[in-house]
Amino acid sequence: MNLNWIIPADRLRSLPPYVFARLDELKANARAQGVDLIDLGMGNPDGATPAPIVEAATAALKDSKNHGYPPFEGTASFRKAITDWYRRRYGVNLDPDGEALPLLGSKEGLTHLALAYINPGDLVLVPSPAYPPHFRGPLIAGADIHPLVLKADQDWLIDLAAIPDRIAERAKILYFNYPSNPTTATAPREFFEEVVAFARRYQILLVHDQAYAELAFDGYQPTSLLEIPGAKEIGVEFHTLSKTYNMAGWRVGFVVGNRHVIQGLRTLKTNLDYGIFAALQTAAETALQLPDKYLVEVQDRYRTRRDFLIKGLESLGWSIPTPKATMYLWIPCPVGSGSTDFALSVLQKTGVVVTPGNAFGVGGEGYVRISLIADCDRLGEALDRFRQSNIRFV
Ligand SMILES: *Cc1c(COP(=O)(O)O)cnc(C)c1O
């Protein structure tokens, strides 16, 4: 039977090609040949979830009152834990009934927000490079994307003044993310103030992704969008427990901020899912109430790896500024080589997987991202292989 009439909807075909596909194929080949891969490509934390969280989950799992459908809007006590956490961390007051919504991981919410707020043809501003759901979500919703190309010499900050008036006037949403994946850039408070003023002036909904709120080093404290006066009227902020608490597989995140925006997202989601398993919401609540020593442990782990790898790469002639936050290094490719070619040659010559920058949009061309998701022994092994295979970095 001829089945070539079974073709995906335009919304799927509008997605740019998956840059990881070729890399995945080469990874599979290398593994099949017995190569001992060091995979620093994904943003997947390598440690265990802290024991008190696992214990809270285990106890909650055994309680049959958690076994039915959870409430659509999340359990009242998890929502309260979220708003308590916000007050403690940022001094921001939020209403647990309407200004906080648990999500099945923040990726889910970031993408569904696009479906809840974007009509086909609406204009969405997205930095390039960006975390892929920030542009893939709007593309699925049929948006026109206006890429805001970020530059090293502007510290990877969005250049708001460079956005033409006619674009700003048409734009409906701006997605952004500081501390940033993949660039590792952080934004000063004044930048957040400028973004809020810009968005109010042009009536643009701000969607800030603060996945790396807690993975900051050397005393640096990231700013929350909602700390800025007036931000709650026009914006929402997404958080995830995946990175901070090593809970990537648990699928727990949340969004806070403007209640109308959250209401729209909730309405869409009541048609799609039933929210997070109640036992996991209990565990997530425990996570947000953990004493700070757990955060300090995670921060120390990534900071140690960051310093170890930067020093090692420097000895090979690769000089990289030290990021103040995130679990990545963002590294220029040797002059004249493209991201994909460089990442593939590193893989072929050394068995080390790095992510080509163009996976995050055209603005990431010329860079690769290394995730600090292996201990210093493995990172040392990666450095040895770089040295032996004479990979040129400059
Ligand atoms: C890892 C990451 C997330 C996390 O997504 P979850 O779906 O909550 O696991 C969100 N945003 C950014 C920028 C990330 O790097």
Image: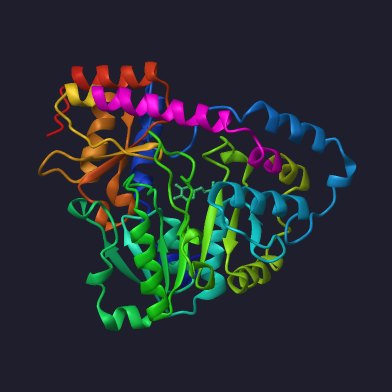
* Left or right, 274 with reference to 359: right
Quarter of the N terminus within the rendering: bottom right
User: Is 286 part of what is drawn in magenta?
Assistant: yes
Q: Measured from the top left, where is residue 27 in percent x and y? A: 37, 33
Which residue is located at x 38 percent, y 72 percent? 197
Q: Nearer the viewer, residue 162 or 246?
A: 162
Q: Residue at x 61, y 68 (%)?
A: 262
Instruction: Report if residue 237 lies within the magenta region.
Output: no
Depth order, front residue of 375/87: 87
User: Residue 139, how many percent across, how many down?
Assistant: 43, 68
Determine the image quadrant of residue 241.
top right
- Can residue 144 be seen? no
| Residue 143: % across, % down | 42, 74
Q: Is residue 279 left or right of residue 240?
A: right
Q: Is residue 280 above or below residue 190?
A: above
In the image, residue 391 sits, relative to residue 120, either above or below, namely: above
Residue at 29% in and 65% down:
148
Image quadrant in which you'd find residue 164: bottom left
Magenta span = 284-311
Q: Determine the image quadrant of residue 348.
A: top left
In the image: residue 345, left or right of residue 131:
left
